[in-house]
Amino acid sequence: MKHTIADWIISKFSKWLLKNEPPRRTYLSDFHRVCDEVRAGDVLLIEGRSRASRIIQYVTLSAWSHAILYIGYLHEIENPETRDLILKHWHKDTPNAQLIIESEIGLGTVVRSLSKYQKDHIRILRPHGLSHADAHRLINFAAKKLGRKYNIRHIFDLARFLFPWTFLPRKWRSSLFQLNALKPTEDICSSMLAEAFDSISFPILPLVVEDDKNNIELIQRNPGLFTPSDFDYSPYFDVIKYPIFKLGKHLSPKDLPWRYGVISDDTGGIRPLNENKASKDDSTK
């Protein structure tokens, strides 16, 4: 396959954007519980750790920077054509893997093992009332997107956020996540999922309108307008959390492994609680 200079630039820039920081918040979710409880058709939100993730989090005012579709084990996929399509695009790095479909910068729409995100903070969003048949239609639709490129315009929109406004004219303000028609052969993570759910008429955040006879109608929104946080905000998805310490009948908040007498400053520093109190008292003198 012939590669252009533009392809090389995009590849290098994508790698730079996608370089992950060390995990800091994996304790917020129990990955093993997530793997046990997730169902085919669920959307998983990821709190990413890359430069691109930080930009998306800043733009959308949300911790969630990436959305993926869980499709289950290969043998659970009922449509033989879909199974063959997934096998064509799946690099079998993990036998009997729990599979996801996602759109990633620099790679496009790909199939991966869920284990890729075992060090990340994950939230399960379950489409409320989604039938077994619709879940498989959803997966069939998403699988047909495998191999599509990631929207290049989206990459350069991300790049604009790396420069202070003083260096760029205000009219160059990025149109990231604003209305723009995605090319029919390209995706971003949220648009890919939005199109998949549109294909089975499942609402995410549709436009609600009222006609002259006061009848309510739902109108699909441009898939390019969706962000990962929209799935979290949608009233049609149930939010499911599996914290590493699950409170309940056998574990109360007081039973958690607290370290008393200290306080954190959220930057990795831990200091004695009385020291923090003393510094406040000194500042009021």
Image (cartoon, helix red, strand yellow):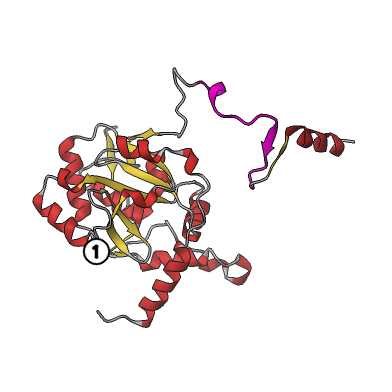
Q: Which residues are magenta?
A: 252-267
Q: Residue at x 40, y 51 (%)?
A: 66
For mark 1, what is the residue? 147
Q: Residue at x 22, y 48 (%)?
A: 96
Label 1 amino acid? Gly
Q: Is residue 112 above or below residue 171?
A: above
Q: Residue at x 10, y 54 (%)?
A: 81
Residue 182's spot in the image, x, y percent?
Answer: 32, 62
Q: How many marks?
A: 1
User: Most prominent secondary structure in the magenta stretch?
Assistant: loop
Residue 226 appearing in the image: no
Residue 139's spot in the image, x, y percent?
Answer: 20, 48
Q: Is residue 124 magenta?
A: no
**Most distant residue in the left direction:** 80
Residue 283's spot in the image, x, y percent?
Answer: 85, 39
Q: Is residue 262 magenta?
A: yes
12 left or right of 266?
A: left
